[in-house]
Amino acid sequence: MDFIKTLEGHSKTIQMSLIEDKLKTLKTQIETQAAGEAMDKLLYLLLQAMSLLFLFNKDYRKNIKDFTGTYVINSQDKKIDVSAIFKKIPVFLTQKDGMEVKDRAVDNPTTTVTFKDGKAMADFLLSGNTDVIAGMLNNQLSVSGNLNYLFKFVYLLWLIPELLGMNNFKDLLSPSA
């Protein structure tokens, strides 16, 4: 009798452990899904801000003087899909260095960055932890094309909050916020 009760106890413990593991997995999936959709919108808005800053801030625009390149930023789970095209932009009757933003992937990009999910993108682009090699080794991102372009893009992205007067931007993105 004691053996059967012990066996039943172990069975319940194993079942509870499996249920807890499944709940943790579901929680992570829900967070990732929500982060993916929110990150896509946040990235698109940041790119729109970047595009406008190039037009109105000549010091910021100096960072892309005569620069051309196309970036596609997406995620494996298909929740993120944004493109940035650096080129001459018509402004009134002149051409200025600028950027066009698309909410889809464009053909033949110079650099493509594919993140595992929205959380991986936030950790890389927005948290200040831009260690590409670590991200690639941890399967959080993959890069094809010109890797130097990725570093330039991240640098330009990090200037936006300061230029917009959002001094607490990093705090807003931290997990404790």
Image (cartoon, rainbow, N blue to C red):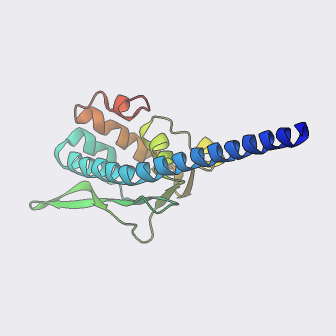
| Percent position of residue 45, x then y | 28, 50
Taking the image as shown, residue 50 lies to the left or right of residue 9, namely: left
Residue 120 in the image: state x and y as whole percent: 51, 46
Q: Residue furthest front?
A: 1
Does residue 36 appear left or right of residue 12 in this picture? left
x%, y% of residue 167? Answer: 28, 27
Foreground pick, 61 / 141: 141
What residue appears at the point 42 percent right and 28 percent down from the top-left corner? 176
Residue 160, compared with residue 146, is above or below; it is above
Residue found farthest to the left: 92
**131 or 166: nearer the viewer:** 166
Q: Residue at x 90, y 40 (%)?
A: 3
Q: How many marks?
A: 0
Q: Is residue 65 visible?
A: no
User: Position of 33 compared to 97: left or right?
Assistant: right
Q: Position of residue 126 (x, y in %)?
A: 41, 40
Q: Is residue 157 left or right of residue 5?
A: left
- Residue at (42%, 43%) from the top-left corner? 154
Relative to 159, residue 110 above or below: below
Say which quadrant the C terminus sits in. Answer: top left
Residue beneath the point at 37% across and 38% down: 158
